[in-house]
Image (cartoon, helix red, strand yellow):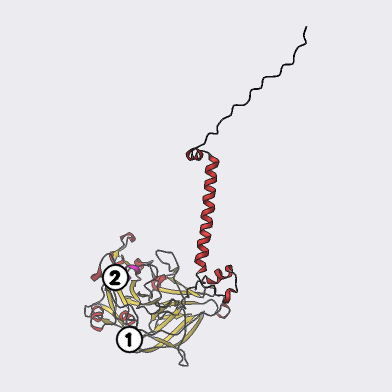
């Protein structure tokens, strides 16, 4: 028996194949290929941006003689430093000495007649006035002429607005003021037209919407007329009235430091009856006098704010009762010449003399003849008779 022969395993040689070439479109279906293309484009864009920036900067002066500074220093030095805008220096306003932006210091004041009948209380807008005159209108009832110094102040509702009397016109003429009112006694209305010095804003001529009655107060109709500083200034602008003032300022000064102010001080003015009794109480911390009337704090109808002032001027004037051409009994005040005055500010009372000539502004003088200085801010002028009871 022949021995078994060793059988070699059958080895099949690999079949030679020809590589299949993919198209460009087929390559784009591969996510790795797409990512590579995107990365390449980003790099190219970045290099292009740098090249353009360098080319742009190369055309600029480096500010370095002989290229003595490197490129980064050149770029920094070539960038201009912004010039900060200058802050306007405040100036003193002519009416009350308050520091305001240039252009706001010499505006003709807006005057508004505000009544003080018990049914008219509380009034709106008195707390925002920059200068106020208080005097008896008739029958022991006082009335206010409130002056507002700046058309750019916030819009404030004001009222009740009431009629004007002749002596309030004398005060308004000190400033060539605009004057808002609801009619007036016949002599006062004739004086507005004949004597000038006032731009008339009579409700009877203007009407709504500048003036409008507020019947929600549930009082007699004559106590319901209101306007606002904004509406009145809009009317003034629409009529293209001259708004630059021509009056002279008084002497104003900064308020005294707290340690130099007077002690707490009360001022009482008995105009006629208890309903028109006025008290001012000084607060050394705020350097203001807070107003009370008829035994109650005198507050603004809209804000609830107690009326305060920086200065109180007690101006004593001669007055008589006369019958106007319309048959109405009214007061006639002598507001030119001179008379006694007491000025209170910084908690201190100073006795002196007031003087006025023609339509010039009333000025206040110390006993030695020097002019008194008022504290910057609002002022209340209390117009009293020689027999008015005053205590302080």
* Residue found at x 58% / y 29%: 16
Q: Main secondary structure of the magenta part?
A: helix
Residue at disc 1, secondary structure? loop
Range of magenta residues: 230-236
Coordinates of residue 74 in the picture (x, y in percent): 56, 70
10 Å crowding of disc 1: few (<14), some (14-19), many (20+): some
- Circle 1 sits on which residue? 359
- Circle 2 sits on which residue? 235
Give 110 or 132, whichever is nearer the viewer: 110
Relative side of 210 to 275, left or right: left
Quarter of the image for the N terminus: give it: top right
Q: Is residue 233 magenta?
A: yes
* Residue found at x 71% / y 19%: 8
Q: Is residue 109 magenta?
A: no
Farthest top residue in view: 1
* Res 111 → quadrant: bottom left
Mark nearest the camera among 2 and 1 is: 2
Q: Does label 2 or label 1 sit earlier along the sequence?
A: 2
Residue at disc 2, secondary structure? helix
For residue 198, above or below residue 82: below
Can residue 141 be seen in this snapshot? no
For residue 51, above or below residue 196: above
Coordinates of residue 41 in the picture (x, y in percent): 51, 50
* Res 122 → quadrant: bottom left
Relative side of 260 to 202, left or right: right
Coordinates of residue 40 in the picture (x, y in percent): 54, 49
* Residue found at x 52% / y 68%: 58
10 Å crowding of disc 2: few (<14), some (14-19), many (20+): some
Can residue 366 be seen in this snapshot? yes
């Amino acid at each position: 028996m022949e021995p078994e022969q060793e059988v070699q395993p059958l080895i099949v040689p690999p079949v030679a194949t020809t590589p299949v070439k993919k198209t460009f479109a087929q390559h784009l279906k591969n996510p790795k290929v797409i990512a590579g293309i995107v990365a390449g484009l980003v790099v190219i864009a970045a290099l292009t941006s740098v090249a353009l920036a360098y080319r742009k900067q190369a055309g600029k002066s480096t500010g370095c003689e002989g290229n003595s500074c490197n490129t980064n220093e050149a770029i920094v030095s070539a960038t201009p430093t912004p010039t900060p805008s200058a802050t306007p220096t405040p100036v003193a306003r002519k009416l009350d000495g308050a520091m305001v932006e240039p252009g706001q210091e010499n505006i003709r004041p807006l005057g508004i007649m505000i009544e003080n009948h018990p049914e008219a209380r509380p009034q709106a807008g008195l707390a925002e006035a920059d200068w106020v005159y208080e005097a008896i209108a008739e029958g022991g009832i006082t009335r206010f002429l409130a002056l507002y110094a700046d058309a750019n102040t916030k819009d404030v509702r004001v009222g009740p607005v009431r009629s004007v009397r002749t002596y309030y016109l004398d005060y308004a003429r000190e400033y060539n003021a605009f004057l808002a009112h609801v009619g007036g006694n016949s002599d006062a209305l004739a004086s507005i037209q004949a004597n000038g010095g006032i731009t008339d804003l009579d409700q009877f001529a203007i009407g709504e919407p500048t003036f409008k009655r507020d019947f929600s107060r549930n009082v007699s109709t004559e106590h319901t007329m209101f306007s606002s500083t904004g509406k009145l200034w809009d009317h003034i602008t629409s009529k293209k009235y001259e708004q630059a003032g021509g009056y002279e300022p008084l002497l104003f000064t900064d308020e005294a430091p707290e340690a130099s102010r007077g002690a707490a001080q009360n001022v009482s003015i008995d105009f006629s009856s208890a309903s028109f009794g006025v008290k001012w109480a000084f607060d050394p911390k705020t350097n203001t006098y807070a107003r009370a009337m008829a035994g109650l704090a005198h507050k603004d109808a809209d804000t609830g704010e107690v009326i305060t002032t920086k200065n109180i001027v007690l101006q004593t004037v001669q007055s008589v009762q006369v019958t106007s051409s319309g048959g109405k009994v009214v007061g006639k005040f002598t507001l030119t010449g001179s008379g006694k005055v007491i000025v209170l500010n910084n908690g201190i009372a100073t006795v002196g003399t007031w003087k006025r000539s023609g339509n010039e502004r009333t000025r206040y003088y110390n006993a030695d003849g020097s002019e008194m200085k008022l504290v910057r801010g609002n002022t209340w002028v209390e117009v009293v008779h020689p027999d008015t009871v005053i205590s302080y």
